[in-house]
Amino acid sequence: MTAAFYYDGRSAERRTVRLTVDGGRLRIAGEAVDAAVPLAQVDFGEPLGKGPRVIELPDGARCEVADHAGLARLLAAAGHADGLVARLQARWRWAAAALAAVVAVAAAGYLWGLPAAARALAPHVPATLTQTISDSVLVQLDRQLFRPSELSPAQQEHLRRRAEASLRRAGLPAWRLHFRAASQLGPNALALPAGDIVVLDKLVQLLDERELLAVVAHEIGHVAHRHGMQRLIQGTAVSLVMAAWFGDVSSAAAVLAGQLLQAGYSRGAEGEADRFAARLLDACCGGREALVGALEKLAGHAGDDGPSWFGSHPDTPARIAAIRGLPQDY
Ligand SMILES: [Zn+2]
C-alpha cells in the first residue's frame, strides 16, 4: 500500500488515496475515490529527480507519489521497470559525472591525446613525405616572408663550413643550412621537419660564430626530436577539423608555415632541444656556454622588428639554469 495524492483531471481538488496492485490492476482507494485500472493502461511516468512521481490514468486523472520507498514497492508489484536512461537520469550525480567525463575526455584529447598521438605518429612519416612537406613550407615562406640573404656568398660558405666541421656528427639527423633575410622578423632561426635550418641575417649579425652554432645545434635538436613534424600533425589535425567545420580546406595549408615561426614549441620541446644542444656543444664546440650566451644576447635584444628567436623561445632564465644544471656527461 502506497500513499498518494489523487487529482481527477477536471478540478484542482487534491484527495488522499492509497495505491495497491491487485489482480493485474492498480487500485486507487481513498477520499471519495475507489477505482481499479488495468496495469496496461497506467502510465507510470519517469522519475524526475527527487520530485513526486506522476502516474497518469487513462481517464485523465493522475496520482502523485512522494513516498519513494512506497513507489518502489508499487512498481515492483506492478512489474514495472524504469528504462536505463530514466534510472540514470534519476541520479543527478550520474548525469553530472557523464557531462564532466565528456568535457574531460575532450580536453584531455586536445591537451594530451593530440600531442601524444603526434609524438607517436611523427617517426612513422616517410622521409620522402617529410622532405616534400619541408620543401613546400620553404617555398611558401620564400614567397610570403623571406628575401634572399644579404650575406656575401663567401660569408655564407664560411658559416656553412664551420657548422659542417663542428656539428656534422654520426648519429645526428641530416640537416642543411639556409640563409635568408626577412624584414618583418627579428633575429630568428627555424628548423623545418626534414632538417632544413633557416638562419636569418639579423641572427648572424647579432651573435658571434660560436653562439650561432649553438642556436643551430638547438635547431638540430628540434629536427632530431621531430618537433616540427609533431607540430605539423597537431596543427593540421586542428586545421582539418576547422576546415571540415567551416568547409574551407585552403586555410589549413596556410596555417602550416605560420605556426612554425610564430607559435614556437612547447616548453617541453624547448627543454629537449636545449638538452640535445648542450650535449652536442659539450662534445663538439668547447661547451654549452655559447648557448647561454646566445640566449642572453637574444633576451637583451630589444627589437621592435618582429618576432625573434627569443620571442618564440621565452622563459630564458629558467632555460639558462636548466642548461647549466645538466651534468657534464649528460
Ligand atoms: Zn627551439
Image (tube, rainbow, N blue to C red):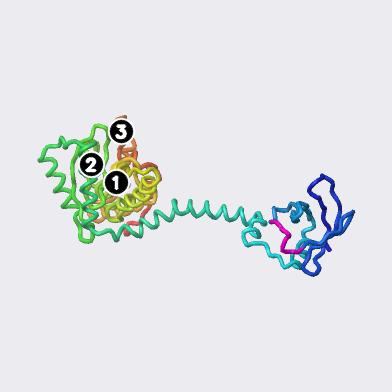
Q: Residues within 10 Å of mark 2 (few under 14, many from 20)?
A: some
Q: Is residue 178 above or below residue 2?
A: above
Q: Nearer the viewer, mark 2 or mark 3?
A: 2
The answer to whether the beta carbon of the residue marked 3 is less than 8 Å from any atom of ligand 1 is no
Residue 105 disc label: none
Which contiguous range is marked in magenta?
38-45
Nearest to the observer: residue 60 or residue 220: 60
Residue type marked 2: Gln
Residue type marked 1: Leu
The mark that comes first in sequence, 2 or 3, is: 2
Question: Which residue has dot 1 on it?
Answer: 291
Task: Identify the residue shown where x is 29% and y is 31%.
Answer: 305
Quarter of the picture containing the N terminus is bottom right
Q: Quadrant of residue 153?
A: top left
Inspect this view and state whether residue 217 appears.
yes
Tell me the element at label 3.
loop
